[in-house]
């Protein structure tokens, strides 16, 4: 799978660890930055990941920050993106099964590294249930008349 990843300074450490984790498991990773813990503005690094997901340049995207909230907000401004903020195994599972999440947002200050890696693993391995959930996603993506 081709996965875009991006973070601000507060998510940089986990971004680097997740990038290595993904590569270890054979995924192709496209890193949209940042490249240090020096303070930056998160939209500059999150929006390009979301646009790559929406344009189908990558299969999925992972974005990180301190809480993950701002990152999810930025990503969800891009049509076609369903970015879910996940904090544990169950939230990651439901993000995929029920919401067909194509982007994952994580908060480095909200969880330990082992939890972050578990969330990523579950989010990548879990399929979409379809059915009634597909109907709901179609309503989310429907344009106003």
Image (cartoon, grey):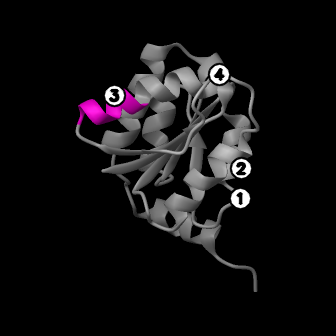
The answer to whether marks 4 and 1 mark residues whose Cβ atoms lie closer than 8 Å is no
Residue segment shown in magenta: 19-25
Q: Nearer the viewer, residue 140 or 78?
A: 78
The percent position of residue 143, horizontal first and vertical second, equals: 69, 79
What is the quadrant of the C terminus in the image?
A: bottom right
Residue at 46% x, 54% y: name it.
Answer: 100
Distance from the alpha carbon under mark 1 to that under mark 2: 5 Å
Residue under pointer 3: 21
The percent position of residue 21, horizontal first and vertical second, equals: 33, 28
Distance from the alpha carbon under mark 1 to that under mark 3: 28 Å
Distance from the alpha carbon under mark 2 to that under mark 3: 25 Å
Residue at 42% x, 38% y: name it.
Answer: 93
Asked which secondary structure carries label 1, the reply is loop
Asked which secondary structure carries label 3, the reply is helix
The answer to whether marks 3 and 4 mark residues whose Cβ atoms lie closer than 8 Å is no
Asked which secondary structure carries label 2, the reply is helix
The percent position of residue 85, horizontal first and vertical second, equals: 60, 38
In the rendered image, the vertical position of residue 106 relative to residue 109, given as above or below:
below
The answer to whether marks 1 and 2 mark residues whose Cβ atoms lie closer than 8 Å is yes
| Circle 3 crowding by C-alpha within 10 Å: few under 14, some 14–19, many from 20 | some
Image quadrant where residue 76 sits? bottom right
Mark sitting earlier along the chain (2/3): 3
On the question of residue 120 being in view, the answer is yes
Residue under pointer 2: 74
Number of the label disc, if any, that sits on residue 77:
1
In the rendered image, the vertical position of residue 54 relative to residue 97, given as above or below:
below
Asked which secondary structure carries label 4, the reply is loop
Distance from the alpha carbon under mark 3 to that under mark 4: 20 Å
Residue at 30% x, 50% y: name it.
Answer: 1
Mark sitting earlier along the chain (1/3): 3
């Amino acid at each position: 799978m081709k996965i875009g990843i991006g973070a601000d300074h507060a998510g940089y450490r986990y971004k680097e660890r997740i990038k290595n984790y993904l590569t270890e498991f054979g995924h192709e990773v496209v890193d949209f930055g940042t490249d240090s813990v020096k303070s930056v503005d998160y939209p500059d690094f999150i929006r390009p990941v979301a646009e790559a997901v929406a344009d189908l340049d990558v299969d999925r995207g992972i974005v990180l920050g301190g809480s993950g909230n701002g990152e999810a907000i930025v990503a969800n401004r891009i049509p076609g993106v369903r970015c879910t903020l996940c904090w544990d195994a169950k939230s990651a599972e439901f993000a995929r099964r029920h919401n067909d999440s194509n982007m994952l947002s994580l908060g480095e200050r909200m969880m330990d590294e082992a939890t972050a890696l578990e969330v990523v693993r579950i989010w990548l391995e879990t399929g979409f249930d379809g059915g009634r959930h597909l109907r709901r996603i179609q309503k989310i993506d429907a344009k106003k008349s």
